[in-house]
Amino acid sequence: MAWTQAHLDALELSIVRGVKSTTYDGERVEYGSIGEMLQLRAVMREALGLVGAMGASRYAVFHSDR
């Protein structure tokens, strides 16, 4: 099974809430630590093509000096 954006969104919501267990698609998922969740998040983001080789987002942010 490949990860989807919905999987990543659910994991990120759990991280933000500080919750180490959640239910997704009727299955309970428990993580050992927030650190483990952050590592999984990085793997998911890479698999979904959301980061480059250096771990940076592929989306550019432009700032104006005006």
Image (tube, helix red, strand yellow):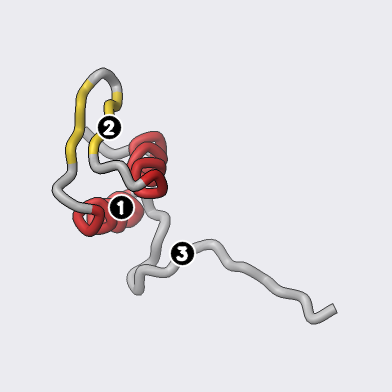
Q: CA distance from mark 2 to mark 1?
A: 15 Å
Residue 29 found in image quarter = top left
Mark 3 → mark 2, Cα distance in angstroms: 26 Å
Is the Cβ of the residue at disc 3 closer than 8 Å to that at disc 2?
A: no
Give the residue at mark 2.
22
Asked if the residue at tag 1 contacts the one at tag 2, i.e. Cβ–Cβ closer than 8 Å, the answer is no
Q: Name which residue lies at 71% across and 74% down.
A: 63
- Say if 26 sits above or below 29 in the image: above
Whether residue 44 is situated above or below residue 55 in the rendered picture: above
CB contact under 8 Å: marks 3 and 1: no
Label of residue 57 in the image: 3
Mark 2 vs mark 1, foreground winner is 2
Query: Where's residue 66, x and y in %?
Result: 85, 78
Name the residue at 38% across, 54% down.
49
The N terminus, quarter of image: top left
- Name the residue at the front extreme: 18
Across and down, in percent, residue 51 comes to 40, 61
**Where is 26 relative to 66, above or below?**
above
Disc 1 element: helix
x, y percent for residue 30: 18, 37
Give SS at disc 3: loop
Could you give the CA–CA distance between mark 3 and mark 1, rounded to whole angstroms? 13 Å
Counting residues from the start of the chain, the first of labels 3 and 1 encountered is 1
Q: Amino acid at mark 3?
A: Ser
Taking 41 as reference, is 6 left or right?
right
User: Hey, which residue is sitting farthest bottom in the picture?
Assistant: 65
Q: Residues within 10 Å of mark 1 (few under 14, many from 20)?
A: some
Q: Which residue is mark 1?
A: 41
Q: Nearer the viewer, residue 13 or 54?
A: 13
